[in-house]
Amino acid sequence: MMRLKCDVKRTCNFLEKESYAYATIRQMVRDDSSYFLAVSRVQHLAWCKTFSDLMKRYFPQTGAVMEQIGALTPVGLEPILKRFFVPLLRRKHVLRIMDIFTGEGVHAIFRIGTTLCCLSHAHLGESILENCDNAAIFWEGVRRYAHSKHFRFDIFLEHQAYGTQRTMRFLSRPIFPYPQYVNNLIAANEEWAEQNQGSLPAYEERKPVGLVEKKVPIELARQSTDRLNLAKWLPPVLQSTKLDLIYSSNHHGRSIEMFYRRCSIAKHTITVMEVLELDVIIGMYATQTWHNNPEGYGDGECFLFRLRPEPKCFKYKSVESHILSLDESEDMSSHINDSGQLMISSDSFISLGIGEDGDSGLRLNDDLTRGSTSKCIGFGNQELIGQGVQVFEVGLVEVYRFLREVDNKPVDGDIDHWKGLFN
């Protein structure tokens, strides 16, 4: 029950407007709370089974695909049944669903959730099984479609979620079954859940990112707790991968030329470094291949992090920032959005993040022995190292690429399965 309360709290925080939260809570107090929320593990499992049954019966093709990739399990259905569409839809659309939810209760989640999956499947195409091998990639595809210009929420509600289909010349019936049928299905599935709850995981047990054992071993991210934190911070499509060491300053030498050469084989990388004398491990995730390019590259998926102590990730939030020009007087300034130039590198440094004072979020010099960090636009990383430290001496530096867990092949080249589909 405590876990459910936390989920409701997270959703209400996302909605921000108190009127939506209060209206829903008042309705829950006024009516049976189970009309809105699964108030027990058995009921949660029953709802998951009901969603799965509805998909297989009314949308069999989509249901078959979702079952094959694990999107109909209790863990796989978390974006809908635990997160209330927050990871999938725009905020304004989640608010609309909240309005419907206060009147219909859980039936709104079943109705909108199943029809959204079916419509997304139709737009993702028949190659979906070639692109998806897990639920996370499928839900990312749903999110891409729901945030694209092809998705019309009002039309979706009217014609899919609450639409009808003709059965005979003058007769039609709703696409989604009547509430009584769903209630009977839930009741039957509660008996099933009671008998099977011991063998079914209701919540995701996240596992650490794997690692590849080689002649030169990974050192800085070898601890499973560190790799578990990386798994939490990485994009879903990289969370079930293995880290493969492609550069080690101890083995390959300390030079920026060697760094670029070793990183040339990978697009998405994690660079981890040791801060000497402070027992601190920090790093950065890059979305493009590191190379000499002082003009800037990368995108808003890049992030900075601290592995030890007190692990913390600093994700980029797109903002327009007023920064001082380095070439003009203090009175001259420019208004920029730097989400497309987060990575800046040359023959004398590599860096991630653009600082308001011209510094970088994290920067290494040409022989990778000295680094600096400062608060930068969009990351809010003023405590990357802590203790007021901005300049530091660098110990070991390692760079990892990602290998697929199933076949140990590099993931680069087919990570963004839905890129360009909804442009």
Image (spheres, helix red, strand yellow):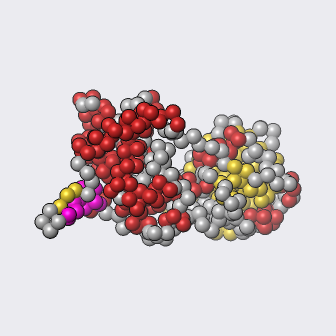
Q: Residue at x 51, y 39 (%)?
A: 200
Q: Which quadrant is the N terminus positioned in? A: top left
Answer whether residue 251 is magenta in the image.
Answer: no
Looking at the picture, tell me which residue is in the foreground, 67 or 107.
Answer: 67
Left or right, 57 with respect to 423, comes to left
Q: Which quadrant is the C terminus positioned in? A: bottom left
Residue 99 drawn at (x, y percent): 26, 45
Q: Is residue 209 above or below residue 280?
A: below
Residue 63 drawn at (x, y percent): 41, 56
Looking at the picture, tell me which residue is in the foreground, 273 or 125.
Answer: 125
User: Does any portion of residue 136 appear in the rendered image?
Assistant: yes
Answer whether residue 159 is magenta in the image.
Answer: yes
Q: Is residue 51 above or below residue 341?
A: above
Q: Residue at x 28, y 40 (%)?
A: 184
Left or right, 41 with respect to 259, comes to left
Quadrant in which residue 227 is drawn: top right
Q: Is residue 288 above or below residue 381?
A: below
Quadrant in which residue 195 is drawn: top left
Looking at the picture, tell me which residue is in the foreground, 183 or 119.
Answer: 183
